[in-house]
C-alpha cells in the first residue's frame, strides 16, 4: 500500500505505532499522550496540525513560542516549552507557556517563581533529568532530584511538579537508549517511595521521533514528536 505522505497520514501512522507499542508493553493505548513538537516549523504547519485536531504544541524557544501563540491567539491552544531555558527567559516563559518540561536547576526555579508571582499564576513543570552521559545534554543529575523537589515544594509553590522528562542518548544502540528511559522510570519509582508532599510524579515525558517506541515500552506517559509528524527540520536543532 502506498500512502501519500501528508501530515494526516504521518500523524495516523504515529498514532498507530504508539498503540502498537502500548500493546506490546501491555499498556492501555490512552496511557500515552502525544505532544506534537512544532519548533522550527512555520505557523502554517501548526494550522495544518490544528485542522487535524491537535491543540497542544511543544516549542523550545520562548521567542518562537510567543510569535506562534500571538499568531494563533484565541483558539485555545496550549504551548509547552521543552527546550533548555536560560534564566533570563524566565519572564517570557512565565507569561506565555502553558507548561515547562525542562526545569533543570534551582536558579531557574527561583526566577520562574518570582515571575509567576508577578503574573499571578502557577505553571505545570516537569523536571528534566540527565540520563545519558552525553555532555551536550541538559538535565539534573538523578541523585539531585529528591532534594530539588523538596526545595520546590517548600519555596516555590507556583511551580507544580507533574513528573520527569528526559532525552535519551543519541545512539544507534537500542540498549543504550532504553537504559536512559529505564533510568528515568526507576528514578520516578524511587522518588515515589519518598512521598514528597505536593509533588506529583504521574508523568514521564520521554521518547522522540527516533526512539518513542522504546520509551513507551519503558513506561513513558508522553512522547514528544516533531519530525515524524511535521517532516524534516530545515535547520538543525541545537540540542
Ligand atoms: C526537538 C525535540 C523533540 C522532538 O524531536 P524529533 O526528533 O523531531 O521528534 C523532543 N524533545 C525535545 C526536548 C526536543 O528538543
Image (tube, helix red, strand yellow):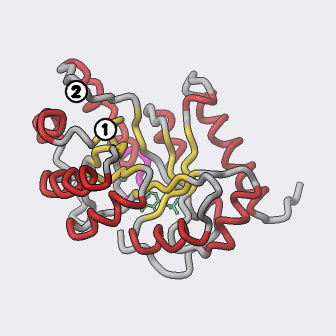
Identify which residue, 209 or 11, lies in the foreground: 11
Q: Secondary structure at mark 2?
A: helix
- Image quarter where the C terminus lies is bottom left
Give me the residue at 60% from left, 72% from top.
Answer: 71
**Does residue 147 belong to the magenta stretch?**
no
- Residue that extends furthest to the right in the rendered view of this protein: 1
Res 133 → quadrant: bottom left
Residue at the spot of label 2: 191
Residue 35 lies, in percent from the top left, at 54, 49
Q: Which residues are magenta?
A: 170-175
86 lies left or right of 100: left
Identify which residue, 54 or 8, lies in the foreground: 54
Residue at the spot of label 1: 160
**Does residue 174 belong to the magenta stretch?**
yes
Give me the residue at 67% from left, 49% from top.
Answer: 14
Residue 9 lies, in percent from the top left, at 78, 56
**Neighbour tally class for label 1: few under 14, some 14-19, many 20 plus, Cα within 10 Å:** some
Amino acid at each position: 500500500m502506498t500512502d501519500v505522505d501528508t501530515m494526516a497520514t504521518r500523524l495516523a501512522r504515529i498514532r498507530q505505532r504508539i498503540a502498537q507499542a502500548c500493546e506490546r508493553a501491555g499498556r492501555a493505548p490512552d496511557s500515552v499522550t502525544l505532544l506534537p513538537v512544532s519548533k522550527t516549523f512555520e505557523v502554517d504547519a501548526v494550522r495544518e496540525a490544528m485542522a487535524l485536531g491537535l491543540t497542544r504544541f511543544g516549542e523550545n524557544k520562548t521567542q518562537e513560542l510567543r510569535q506562534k501563540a500571538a499568531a494563533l491567539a484565541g483558539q485555545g491552544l496550549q504551548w509547552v516549552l521543552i527546550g533548555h531555558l536560560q534564566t533570563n527567559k524566565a519572564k517570557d516563559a512565565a507569561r506565555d507557556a502553558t507548561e515547562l518540561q525542562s526545569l533543570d536547576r534551582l536558579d531557574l526555579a527561583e526566577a520562574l517563581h518570582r515571575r509567576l508571582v508577578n503574573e499571578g499564576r502557577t505553571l505545570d513543570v516537569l523536571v528534566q533529568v540527565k540520563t545519558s552521559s552525553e555532555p551536550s545534554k541538559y538535565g539534573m543529575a538523578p541523585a539531585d532530584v529528591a532534594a530539588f523537589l523538596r526545595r520546590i515544594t517548600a519555596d516555590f509553590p507556583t511551580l507544580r511538579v507533574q513528573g520527569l522528562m528526559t532525552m535519551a542518548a543519541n545512539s544507534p544502540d537500542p540498549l543504550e537508549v532504553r537504559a536512559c528511559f529505564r533510568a528515568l522510570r526507576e528514578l520516578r519509582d524511587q522518588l515515589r517511595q519518598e512521598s514528597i508532599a505536593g509533588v506529583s510524579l504521574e508523568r514521564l515525558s520521554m521518547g522522540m521521533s527516533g526512539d518513542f517506541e522504546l520509551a513507551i515500552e519503558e513506561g513513558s506517559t508522553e512522547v514528544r514528536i516533531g519530525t515524524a509528524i511535521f517532516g524534516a527540520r530545515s535547520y538543525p536543532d541545537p540540542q
